[in-house]
Amino acid sequence: MSSQPSEDARIAASPLVAWLQQREREIVGTIREMVKRESPSSDKQAVDALGAWLAERFRAAGATVTMHPAVKYGDHLQADFPGEGERVLLLGHFDTVWDVGTLKTMPWREEKGRLWGPGVLDMKTGIAQMLFAVEALRAVRGHLPRPVTVLLVTDEEVGSGSSRRITERVAKDCAAVLVLEPSFGLHGALKTARKGVGAFIVTVIGVASHAGLDFEKGASAILELSRQLLKVAEFPDVEQGITVNPGVIRGGTRNNVIAAEASANIDVRITKLAQASEIEKKIRGLIAVDRRCKIMVEGGLNRPPLERTEAVARLFGIAKKAGAELGLSLDEAAVGGGSDGNFTAALEIPTLDGLGAPGEGAHAVNESVLVEQIVPRTALLARLIEEV
C-alpha cells in the first residue's frame, strides 16, 4: 500500500485541519480549564465538579449527557451524539493521579512548545480532542457520519472497579472503540497491544512470641514471606512478556516480637489472556516452608490484555492511512501499562488505543503535551470517526 495519500484524501482532510487550526487557542483554553480543575481519583467532590463542567461542554456541542452515579468515586460521564449507522465509542477518563493542590508545585503553563500541568497528558488533552473532533465534523461536514458515544470514567487510575461494567455495556453496542489515552513517546506511536494487569496480595500468618524469652515458640511471618518471595522471583518470563513484581511489603509490630503477620502486594503483567490462569495458579499454589505458618492469597487479574488481533491491526491500518493525509507518519507500539481499552478489546470489539496527542511524563513532574501535535491528532480522530 502506498504511504502517499490520494488527492481526494487530502481534500477530505484539509477542511477539518483548517477548522481546527483556527480554533487551536480555544482547544488550548479548554485543556487549561480542565487541568486547573484538579480531579484526583480519591476526591469525589473535585472529580464531580469537573464532571459537571464537562457535561455542560458536551451538551453545548449537541450531546445527550448521562451521568452514571458512583458512590466512592466521581460519577461517570456518557455523552451520546446522534447519527446514522454503526456507533463508535470514544473512551477515556478524567480522574488523575495528582492530589488537589498539586498545581502549586506543578502549575499550568505553556512554554517551549508544550502544555504543562497535572493531568495534561493523562488524559485531559485527549478529552479536548474528543470534543473538538466531533465539533469539527459537525461544522465542516454538516453532520456526524455515524452515532458517536463519549464515555469518560472517573476511576481508571485506580483499577476501574466501579466503571468496568458500564464500559463493557456501552462498548457492546459499538462497532469500534477509539481510546484517547496518550500516544507512546514523543513520536506518538499508537498502541495496538497492552499488557494485562493483575494485582495480588500474599499474606502470611505466623505465630507471635517474645523474641528473647520464647524465640523457638514463634513462627516468623516475615521470614516465611521472604521464602515465598524467592519463589515468586522465579515466576517471570520476560521473553514471553510475563513480569511479576513484589512492589510493597509489610510485616511485624516490634523488634522484640516474632512477627505474626506479613504481606506483599504483587503486580503481574501478561501479554496474552492464556497466560493468566498459569501465573495465577502459581501464586495461589504457594506452600509454606514452615508449616506452622499459613498463606492466604487475594486478588487476581484486573485487566485482560489488549492483544494485537486482526481487528486491531485493521484499525491501525485505517489510522496510518488517515495519518498520511495529515502529514503524520504513524508507528505502533506494544506497551506494559493497561487502560480501559483492555476491557473492550477482550470483548472482541475492535479497539485502537493511544490516540491522544504526544507528550511525556505521565504520572511524573514533567507531564507535558506537544502543542503542535494537538490539531493534527484531533483531525486524525475526526477522520477515524468517519472511516472506521
Image (cartoon, rainbow, N blue to C red):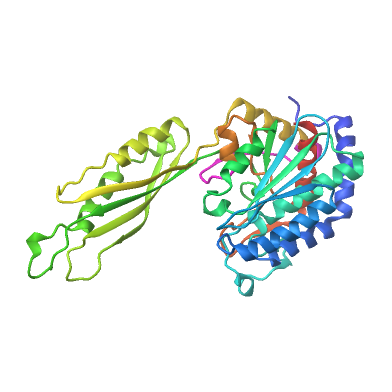
Q: How many marks?
A: 0
Give the quarter of the image for residue 276: top left
Residue 130 image offset from top left, x and y in percent: 75, 48
Closer to us: 302 or 3: 302
The residues colored magenta run 323-340
Residue 288 counted in the magenta span: no
Quadrant placement of the C terminus: top right
Closer to us: 152 or 225: 152
Q: Say left or right for 186 vs 231.
A: right
Depicted 160 relative to depicted 193: above or below: below
At a point 7% along the width and 60% down the height, the residue shown is 216
Closer to us: 177 or 84: 84
Depicted 96 relative to depicted 8: above or below: below
Residue 332 counted in the magenta span: yes
At a point 20% along the width and 71% down the height, the residue shown is 255
Q: Say left or right for 165 vs 267.
A: right
